Image (tube, grey):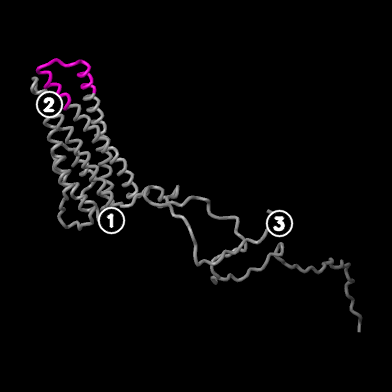
Amino acid sequence: MHPQHYPPPQHQHPPPYRPRVRWVATPPYHAPRRRAVDHRYYGPPAYRVPPRWGFPNVVWRLPTAVPGTPSNSPRPAQRLRALYRNATMLLWVLAAFATLSAFAEGWRYVLLLISREDALDADVVGTSDALVLTGALLTFVLALFAAGVSLWWLLVARVVAADELGERPARPPWQVVAGFFVPGPNLVMAGSIIAETEHSVLRRPGAERPRPSRLVLAWWGTWVLNGLLLVISVIWRLRDGVQAQADGVLLAVLTDGSAAALAVLTALLVRRMTGLLAPVGEDKLRHLRVLKVTGAPEPELRPSRPATAPR
């Protein structure tokens, strides 16, 4: 056999050295393993020592009003009590000044009778005129304020009474305002509105016809009398003559007297209805205090704190 000739082997480089590396992934910082969440209830939290956190040191009051929340606005019953105090104060002051104005007008009428036969002292006449002007001006200003606050109280009282019954007020607010300030119809509508309000305050059904009490009837009659006297007095003062002026002074006495009676009856009516809607005022509530605890276990005392413990 003839030997076969193979090509000479070429120069071969050895393979590069690759060290064996094993990559192992571990969680950073040795994170603890997640434990199963235990949803069982073990009762309220208990602390070995009183915690340093807690509720702010506030004074609890009745009813509670938290600033920044809807409860900060007063409820209709609270607003009713506040309006009741303001309205009654203004009404009693109005009654006092209306009585003073009626006395001043009566004194002027007496001076007119005396002047028919004798001369009057200038100081007496000046004092009478000043008293009449002061009484009339203060009575007019107080009547405006008292009417506004009393009407506001009436609107709130109608809302509170309707809420107690679970119904809506019988009339919208604009009809109530028009029923008191529109001349002519106000003589009839004012009494019916007060009767409807009393009907709701007494928790009577809305389908039943209102039956006004004696206080409401007396207020209604005084309201009509005062309105008629006011109109007649204004028209009578437009006449000329000494006798017409003297009659105008007498009508002013009657008008101021009826205004004083109307203010007194209104104050009594406001007090009666407010007492039925909100019988207990915030000023009559006694502060709640813990005087004695009986039957309760002894509280766990706080353990002594080491002097070296960090604070």
In the rendered image of this protein, does residue 44 appear above or below residue 265?
below
Label 1: which secondary element: helix
Q: Position of residue 61 (x, y in %)?
A: 43, 51
Q: Which residue is mark 3?
A: 309
Q: Which residues are magenta?
A: 106-130
Callout 1 environment at 10 Å: few (<14), some (14 to 19), or many (20+)?
some
The label on residue 248 is 2
Q: Where, by quadrant of the figure, is residue 206 drawn?
A: bottom left
Q: Residue at x 24, y 42 (%)?
A: 267
Q: Residue 24 versus residue 11: which sits nearer the camera? A: 24
Does the segment drawn in magenta span residue 155?
no
In the rendered image of this protein, does residue 186 appear above or below residue 238?
below
Q: Earlier in the sequence, mark 1 or mark 3?
A: 1
CA gap between label 3 and label 2 equals 92 Å
Q: Which residue is mark 1?
A: 164
Residue sticking out furthest to the front: 118
- 1 or 3: mark nearer the eye: 3
Callout 2 environment at 10 Å: few (<14), some (14 to 19), or many (20+)?
many
Q: Earlier in the sequence, mark 1 or mark 2?
A: 1
- Type of residue at label 2? Gly
In the rendered image of this protein, does residue 119 appear above or below residue 16?
above
Q: Residue 286 versus residue 41: which sits nearer the camera? A: 286
Counting every numbered tag in the picture gives 3
- 1 or 2: mark nearer the eye: 2
